[in-house]
Image (cartoon, coloured by chain):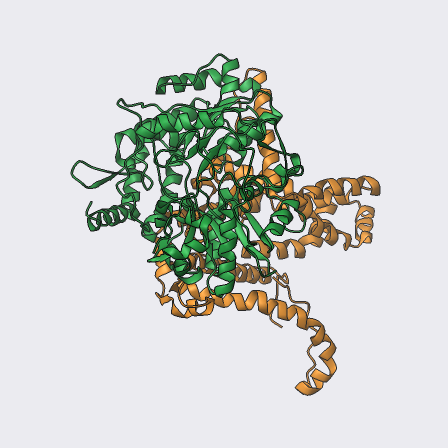
Amino acid sequence: MLPHRQPLTLLKPDIPGEGPLPDGYLEYPSQLVRVITEKPGRSSQPIQTMTASWGPTPPGLGRNSFLDAVNAELGVPVAPSVQDGNTFAAKLSAVLGARDVPELLSAPSWEIAKIPRFSQAVKALFADLTEHLQGDAARAYPMLASLPTAAWQNSVWGGRLAAVPYPTDGPFPWALFYRKDLCDRALVAAPRNIDELYQFGKRMTDPSRGVWAFGNVFDMVQMFFKCPGTLGGWRRTASGGLEHKYELPEYRQALEFSARLYREGLVHPDLVASNGSDSKQLFNAGKMIACQDGLGVWRGTQSEQSQITPGFNIQPVPLFSAVGGPPLAWAGDTPIFYTFVKKGLGRERTEELLRVLNWCAAPFGSQEHELNLYGVEGRHFTRSPDGSPIATHLGRRELADQYRLLGGRVPSLVGTADVPHFVTDLLEYSRTTYPYREENPFSGIKLELPPNYSRGIVPTEDKISDIVRGRRPLTDLSQIVREWRVASGDEGQAFLEKVLSENGR
Amino acid sequence: MNTAAPLPAVTPNRRSTRARLRRDWPFLLMAAPAALLLLVFHYVPTLGNVIAFQDYNPFEGDNALEAFLASEWIGLENFFTLFDDPAFWDALRNTLAITLFQLVCFFPLPILLAILLHGIVSHRLRSFIQSVVYLPHFFSWVLVITFFVQMLGGAGLLSQALRERGFEPWDVMTNPHGFIVLVTAEAVWKDAGWGSIVFLAALSTIDPSLYEAAAVDGAARWARLWHITLPGLRPVIILLLILRLGDALSVGFEQYLLQRDAVGRQAAEVLDTFVYHQAIVPQEWGLGAAAGLFKALIGLVLLLLSNRLAHALGEQGVYSKS
């Protein structure tokens, strides 16, 4: 059912990838090749798309020269609807519930995990791509055929190939970023253990200057205390069963530590909303020194902010263990996004959409890739002396990954002049962290959690957040966990244990 | 919520329907667009409430209608699930507490403000003050709450000023115990001015000669307020009070959604945010519809009760039987 992979390497990587770590390229190539000769679009009917973005909303079709440029290349207009990534699940839920989906829908995989009965939604609303892409049929879409097979495996719902994956370029969901430039100036080093993390907070917090050390760091603290992170916190016991982080002493310690950061006023008081958009601004403005985020924000933040603040430098704090032994890194290998095609569009239109996705999947080293990521030279980007593109003001305003997230791509990391040390820094962090990755007992199994279990997650996390922020005492944890067990936790555990035994694990 | 216009006096000898049609057709034509809108956007969607009694699965069948028909009928189970959920009762309690608190602390303020404004003689000053107090109504909740955070938050103006003078900062925005006062303060800042418009209009209908006569008879300022102004406002006050009671289970949505993380679910979850978090986001549509239906029923009962109370007090209320 999966496409036969046809690797397509345009350039030789300087630092070859390893496992889920991407290939690294230290320099931008001077010669780009054209990989798609035929225009993907044949009709002139606009393609409605929906993608996530974690920045300001860009201007829409008709007022956006970047869209015009790419659409001219595609031969068919794409009319994107860009949605706030922080609240994507709510939007997705409404769109699916109304059965009113765009022709191309790209959704983050962690948001899909929040949607109950998603496989039924796929069956009811999205096209079966199997016949278009299975085996050698994928030859018609060479860029899609070059995507890793493991990513395609994840794109199967209910025995049908239902989506085009956007393969992950790094297995780690979280890193603890800190403002190295500000810490260097204050002569404070990155913390290497949990006591130093606390001291770091004490030394970097200065309310009289409106500066606090931390934003949200709770997930990272859990990782430092080696709480399990698979599917929200499950791990195997010695006897072969499962146990959840809520019931482990490590979790209690992590909770206690985090609550202490709040109690002692080391967390920025404006960090009231847990959806992180304000948090990013405080961090960028130096009002907050350290906070957790996905490694994916590193390049964009560094590139954008070094234009505003000379010397701006963010780095991830190297992972450590607060409870002895080697550190633990939560890790995942699922694709970052999936792109679904609306059902019932007819063969011709579906093929046109797949050709558009194929164009969007053109790899690094191609002209298509450059246009997709950076826009038009002279308008949306200029070239630095080493040949790498640097976004102009217009480029920053008009580009919001409208096409990039649609088509997947072979993951690669490319050094550009705006972020000089980024590739080596990220790859070094990833390589150092990789050996500590958590073992996932469900690796490779496609599962959909029972709706009642999914429903229990957010209310429980709300209650735990009450403890972290000091609104409830730590002693309430056992009661909260008991409520969770009765309402949904037991059901979830039984389900997951059954999945393991059915798969012979 | 349409208040019925006073009905024309019913003629004792009714004309035939045909004759009335011939006479009234221009009016019916004029009312048709509004009736159509009401039908399409209110009455037809109301049929969707059927999912409150279903394990509604939007992905059944080939289209939305088939999804309705194919979803399993589970009777009152959604309501039982709802009433079993302690979070629902928390939300209901918060909602009622906020409604009652605002009824006492917010509802009278626009009346006071209107009376004060009415007392300003200078037209220029009056319209200037009116513009200033109406303005916040047009700010979105995001903006209002950002203002409050910038002023009263832990890193805001107040806390920084206290810190500079060596006092403990006072973080108003993340204190769950004072939340009810905070949201009321926000609502007052945003909407008290706007709410005074209706009362100003009512004040302008009071015959000035009543004041003059009272003044001639030696009535002091307070006596005039008590015996002329307030009785003049009474029908409007009662009317708005009834409407507010019918809406007792809605206290707003964005204001609470935005501040939920700041003070926690325990303090900030109201019925509408409960529906959002427990039904819309996790796709429990049936449960959400059940909560909505429950809310509507309670609202209807409150509305009928308060209307009856208004009649008992000799007021016209929202509507009356002809």
Q: Is residue A122 above or below residue B100?
A: below
* Residue B12 at x, y percent in the picture: 68, 83
Q: Is residue A281 above or below residue B77?
A: above
- From the viewer's perspective, is A192 left or right of A499? right
* Residue B138 at x, y percent in the picture: 67, 45
Residue A491 appears in the rendering: yes
Query: Seen from this angle, which residue lies furthest top?
Result: A187
> Which chain gets the orange colouring?
B
Q: Residue placed at 67% from the left, 55% from the top?
A: B236
- From the viewer's perspective, is A148 left or right of A104? left
* Residue B311 at x, y percent in the picture: 59, 63
Q: Is residue A162 above or below residue A481?
A: below
Q: Nearer the viewer, residue A175 or B13?
A: A175
Number of marks in picture = 0
Q: Quadrant of the N terminus of chain A?
A: bottom left
Q: Quadrant of the C terminus of chain A?
A: top left
Snapshot quadrant of residue B13: bottom right
Residue B92 appears in the rendering: no
* Residue B244 at x, y percent in the picture: 58, 53
- From the viewer's perspective, is A214 left or right of A219? right
Q: Nearer the viewer, residue A497 or B112?
A: A497
Q: Nearer the viewer, residue A55 or A275?
A: A55
Snapshot quadrant of residue B77: bottom left
Snapshot quadrant of residue A235: top left
> Which chain gets the green colouring?
A
